[in-house]
Amino acid sequence: MCGIAGIISNNSSLISTDRIKKMTDALAHRGPDAEGHWMNSTTALGNRRLAIIDLSNAGNQPIHYLQRYTITHNGEIYNYLELKEELQKKGYSFNSKTDTEVIVAAYDHWKEECVDHFDGMFAFAVWDEREKQLFVARDRFGEKPFFYFFDNDQFVFASEMKALWAAGIERKVNLKLLFNYLTIGYVDNPNIPEETFFENIFKLPAASFLKFSTSIFQLSISNYWDIDVENKNKKINDAEAIEQFVFLFQRSVQRRLRSDVTIGTSLSGGLDSSSIIATLHSLTSQNSPPAAFTSVFPGFEKDESVFAKLVADKFHLQHFTIIPDAATLHNDLEKLFYYQEEPFSSSSIYAQYKVYELAKQKGIKVLLDGQGADETLAGYHKYYKWYWQELFRKRKLISSNELNAAKELGITEKFGWKNRFAALFPEFATIFLEKHFLLNALRHEDLTKDFTQLQSKEAYYITPEIFSLNGVLYFNTCMHGLEELLRYADRNSMAHGREVRLPFLDHELVEFIFSLPANFKIRSGWTKWLLRETMKDKLPNEIVWRKDKTGFEPPQQQWIQNEKITELIRDAKKILVDEKILKPEVIDKKIEAKPAHEADDYDWRYLSSSFLFK
């Protein structure tokens, strides 16, 4: 796990040790263990290393290979041992025990198709001295970041945008994306995945690779992986599905235990992190119990500490807890925004930030985490309506008894005439929803007329192309939703020099889940049915059959009423008024304290977006 940076230019004045070092200095938090730089006449590569595999100096980057390639890499290739053995049989040799060296050997052998062989999270750049070409690739789900700037003189890239600013790239806010964030809460553009909150800085989309040649000074971007949403295995039975899920999930966890440093785990008290711990327990025989880390909120109705303790006690974990509050949030906000770089939806990510900080204090360098399960296995209550619409369209809703089953579980989701209309006429429903959100955005009473008129020409709100449960799961996994959460996790963990590994995002596991019919995700009113069935004999019933759904939610409503946080929000409004985004009268408008995941949380958005202008 590292921070990477690079400059490619035919203008030698843009290539310097000082410039590339400024970039890696800005990424020092991502790699506190070592730094390295390499240059030739057209190229400068830099790296800040967080040593996880092969802790010796042989693992320091950039790494050179075959007197031809130079690589800088951020991430982990979990199946590097299998690939290394395969490549050795083909005649390749290695000077280190790292996964990074395996990447560059794989690139020499398979060229751009090397990414098809990788199970991991990664963003890497390989310079080919013979071809005078840079090859860049990013993992399938976007766990690891890759930002770049490109004009007629230079191609500059880094793990975080602050490194680009350190290289002198202009910081110019993308007001169009800001408009969509302030009105509908989007932190990205699903139609243009490379867009960021800064006009001249782009991100390489997930599951993509990039080629850049100095001879023609052009770049090309290609997608290398996707999921076939409609390719379902309708013949598989429950026992077969459970058996295959167990095999793939256990393999995923086992590969993510490959490390030369101690591994711990996040523990929210929910099903996902608990499932990882149960699987970890079955795979290892550690002399000392693994460490688990939890954010707790005593007295808060959505505090999950009771559930987390159940799991910690069952598996005899070293359980460490931390209590974030309004005072610590106030003290940490500026740092939190500095590391995140772009606005975020609520204060919920602060709980995660403090968990990783606690892991650093306890000396745990790598943590397993449960992200990705909700998006692939249908964990959120919003997925009910999509499943019900699918059943209604197939005339199976009544016979399935899913509405009654959900009601018996206390699910409050409704299935009314609008849902029936959307099920039968999805194209019209899409048009209606897009227009509805655009009109609401245009009517936003706090925004100045000029800002709204200039920036509202493109509405970012879109719906899944396929109106089915698998369709919306694909949308949230691969287009809009999951990558936002992965961004938060990457910046929060790397702020403290920690690495986060996500077993639910093994791509073969995800492909298998998407191959299953919808009733393996929601059945008898239960979300994530397949995971629950798999874990019912391995975890306490209170965890497996929890009816509520809480996602790292802190007492934001209470925090925002804190005098110091309120003052920060007022200051944020003043900044946005000065930028002619908000009307002056908004400054004196009463602040609305809302829960973390509630819609139209405008005051939090004002606070979050104000840091773009600092």
Image (cartoon, rainbow, N blue to C red):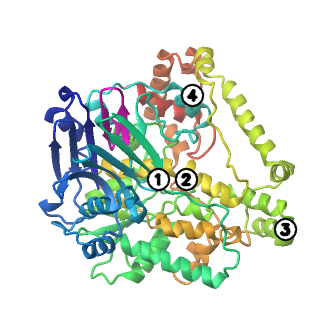
Q: Is residue 152 magenta?
A: yes
Name the mark on residue 207: 1
Q: Is residue 315 found left or right of 404 in the rendered image?
A: left
- Magenta part of the chain: 147-161
Q: Is residue 249 found left or right of 156 in the rendered image?
A: right
Helix, strand or loop at mark 1: loop
Q: Residue at x 33, y 57 (%)?
A: 75
Q: What amino acid is at disc 4?
A: Phe
Disc with the residue nearer the chain's start (1 vs 4): 4
**Disc 4: which residue:** 179
**Disc 3: which residue:** 396
Query: What's the CA distance linking mark 3 and mark 1?
Result: 36 Å
Disc with the residue nearer the chain's start (2 vs 4): 4
Helix, strand or loop at mark 4: helix
- Percent from the top left, x then y, of residue 375? 58, 59
Quadrant of the rendered structure where residue 105 is? bottom left
